[in-house]
Image (cartoon, grey):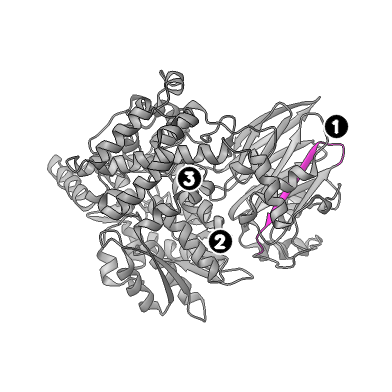
Amino acid sequence: MCGIGGVMYADPAHPVDPQVLVGMAAIQYHRGPDGFGYEIVENRGVGFTHARLSIIDLNPERGRQPFRSENGQFLIAHNGEFYDYKRLRADLTSRGYTFRTKSDTELLLHLSDRFGLDGTLAHLRGEFAFAVYEQQQDRLTLVRDRFGVKPLFWSLTPEGFVFGSEIKVVMAHPAVPGRFSSEGLYHQLMQTMVPGTTGFEGIYAVEPGQKVVVQRRDGQLTIHKEQYWDLNFPLLGTRPQRSDQDYMEELRQRFVEAIQLRLEADVPVACYLSGGIDSCTILGVAAACQQSPVKAFTIGFDDADYDETAIAREMAAAVGADQDILMVDGTQLYDHFARTLWHTERSIYNTFTVAKLLMSEHVHRAGYKVVVTGEGSDELFAGYPQLRLDMIRHGMDHATPEERADLEAWLAESNKLFKGNLLAEAPLEDSALAAVVGFTPSCLQSWLSSATHVPALLHPQHRAAVADYGPGGAIAAALDAQQLRDRHPLDKAQYVWIKTQFESQVLGWAGDRVDMANSLEARPAFLDHPLVEFAVTLPPNLRFRGYQDKFILRETMRELLPETLYKRQKFAFMAPPSHTDVVKQRALQNLADTYLSRDAVDAAALLDYGAVQAVLKRHQDEATPVAERVQLDAVINHLLSVQILHQQFVAQDVTQLAQAKAQEVGWSAPQTSLV
């Protein structure tokens, strides 16, 4: 894994400043501390930059990017991993292609030469974000992996097109200003983003499974987006009719293969281990694949309601793993809040992402660069309570009203810790989403509920700008209605979650962004796309049956799991909210004293000071109902987030920060190469 960035100017004669490219690499030093490189295409106004984390081909010179083809047609900068690269390299070698490195990135050059860029994408298996400039076509293409594991952002300025692995990389270009958009600020305060957007004006995300194509003609740039891959849940009535056993056997085969591929590296590979069946099944298979004990890293909390270390210990002992547990207390979660925001580049509602940052730091210090993780299982097998709630309400055609009510009451009771957060306190209907989906997905309801309070929290100028704005409508407009039409309700719920919260939250601010903050590559085995393309064919009752979430995964991997874990319902990984004890409340208040003071709020001009104080007072009142305090915890975290993000990305000149970072790490312009 690495970090990339670059520019393409509208005028091909526009000079590319090599020092700007150096700064764009340096500001993401955490993504690639093992070296950097850049290339400028002479008289084309094109320049790429790259910060390297060496995992495949550790040679510092051979693996240096950007790469260019021998004929000069392709210039490539790549972040991520292509699995099955050895087989592909052997096949290409047998066809007369010569490899100069052992890097998986070089596959792009030869595959693109053989199949063209579009034909190449079907052969890529893994997590990736890359940029390709085709000199003959005078065309730049950004490509992001099928699920958005690796981030990629872009902005169109009056001078040209700027892109980078992180928002700060884009802002490191002097033509890209740092400021919140009113709509982006609105969504930062309600947690759920519109797919493809960020909180910052004029800066966008390449969406999962998407290409952004920048074509230059006659000194003009045109931008075109294409979806090269998407989740294709079967149309109603077309799902394959197979036995449970057949489905389980294919799941086992595809799952084992996905893990085996992700254990391939030129450096040691560890596993993240929580108390859930996702990471536990991965650990079990990984332990069977390796001769030596697997290293397993676990996070523990100082609150028994949220701590899962006991079950994780049981699993580690069962497979003989070498377990390392990092215990995190409440004050740490707030001590490192601002540092975490620098990497997430967006608001967070719960401090578990701070815990993840501390964990990745711990793993890095232990000498590891790669971990296999369990993200994606809940999305594929309906693990989250929000998804199961939609199944109960909309997808159980033969259930009686009494059976539905019983299941819904059981779900609410077993997830009462998350009431007002993952689960809305009361049902909510959004007409725009209902028109596209057929109902308002439960995964959006709690955040849409909090959205009704957002306008009052905004500074009057921003409040006026979003007076007629409908966040549900904006999200609905960004969804592909064709992929939701004539699908089972559980399929629809999973699709919406994967396109919204999963990409921006689970894989984004709770995944890549805090792992790569400490130069740690996370490999989510469940997101191996052949496994996913099989999983979408699973009947709904194999995902949620009776009172069991992720039914097929539990049954398929039952022999690997301790009995306690096999019987345990999904428990969301969450840090204890601040209202749960006095120490955390005091730590939160210390942050509020700094970032939510009148001076700080007035200087940023994002929020309404009086409304902010009312929220803080309501949160501190012990008479406030627990479910409301849970929601207020999230609201306050969002308020702190936007204030901190303003200080980091708006009040400061990110271009100057990038150049200062280049000086600090000793990276400078003489590394340049003209193509």
The magenta stretch is 42-54
Q: Position of residue 361 (x, y in %)?
A: 51, 62
Q: Any mark on residue 503, and which? A: 3
Q: Any mark on residue 520, and which? A: 2
How far apart are labels 2 and 3 at the CA level? 19 Å
In this view of the protein, can residue 238 be seen by the observer? Answer: no
* Residue contact at pointers 2 and 3, CB within 8 angstroms: no
Please give left or right for residue 231 compared with residue 569 in the image: right
Q: Any mark on residue 24, and which? A: none
Q: Which amino acid does label 2 sit on?
A: Leu
Closer to the eye: label 2 or 3: 2
Crowding near the residue tagged with mark 3, few <14, some 14–19, many ≥20 C-alpha atoms within 10 Å: many
Residue in the picture at 87% in, 37% down = 43
- Nearest to the observer: residue 227 or residue 196: 196
* Residue contact at pointers 2 and 1, CB within 8 angstroms: no
- Nearest to the observer: residue 595 or residue 401: 595
* Residue contact at pointers 1 and 3, CB within 8 angstroms: no
Q: In which quarter of the image is the N terminus?
A: bottom right
Name the secondary structure under disc 3: helix
Please give left or right for residue 157 compared with residue 96 in the image: left
- Nearest to the observer: residue 301 or residue 561: 301
Please identify the residue farthest to the left as the structure is shown: 402
Tell which circle, 2 or 3, labels the residue nearer the N-terminal end.
3
Mark 1 sits on what residue? 13
Name the secondary structure under disc 2: loop
Q: Does the magenta stretch include residue 49?
A: yes
Q: Does the magenta stretch include residue 424?
A: no
Residue in the picture at 47% in, 67% down = 271
Q: In the figure, 463 relative to 488: above or below?
A: above
Q: In the figure, 547 relative to 447: above or below?
A: below
Q: Position of residue 182 (x, y in %)?
A: 48, 26
Residue in the picture at 25% in, 36% down = 618
